[in-house]
Amino acid sequence: MGIRHTFIQNLKFYRKQAGLTQEKLAEKIGMSTAYIGDMEARERFPSAETIDKIADALNVRPSILFDEFGSPASINDSFKKIYAKTLQHELKEKLEQAVEDVCKMI
């Protein structure tokens, strides 16, 4: 997961957490609703100045918008990235052992 993906997930989460529609957030930061929509659709990325305005409007630190553990969706993606291979390997070993055990019983 890249920094832009993390930003977008966190932006959506904190915007909804603040009870703001794309339109209301756009009004608060002096941008168009289309601009917010484009950001959330990954078609545009805001400047540092706009990020500061967004963070202020959402009442969060700008850095939280880039934190891979900044929102539940980001935490979920990070968890998958960190643990998916480990869990997959462990499940495969357990499944193989279970199949062996069943075969021994036959």
Image (cartoon, rainbow, N blue to C red):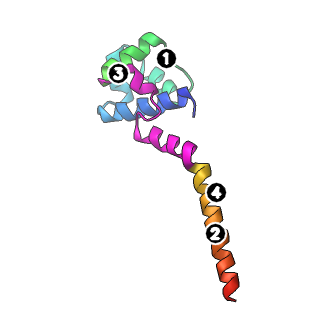
- Which residue has dot 1 on it? 46
Q: Which residues are magenta?
A: 59-83
Picture quadrant where residue 27 is located: top left
Task: Evaluate whether residue 31 shows in this view.
Answer: no
User: Amino acid under label 3?
Assistant: Arg
Q: Residues within 10 Å of mark 4 (few under 14, many from 20)?
A: few
- Which residue has dot 4 on it? 89
CA gap, disc 4 and disc 1? 39 Å
Q: Which mark is residue 61?
A: 3
Q: Quadrant of the N terminus?
A: top right
Of circles 1 and 3, which is in front?
3
Q: Residues within 10 Å of mark 3 (few under 14, many from 20)?
A: few
User: Amino acid under label 2?
Assistant: Leu
Instruction: Looking at this view, name the residue that lies furthest to the bottom.
Output: 106
Whether residue 61 is in magenta: the answer is yes
Of circles 4 and 1, which is in front?
4
Q: Are marks 2 and 4 in contact (CB under 8 Å)?
A: no
CA gap, disc 2 and disc 1? 47 Å
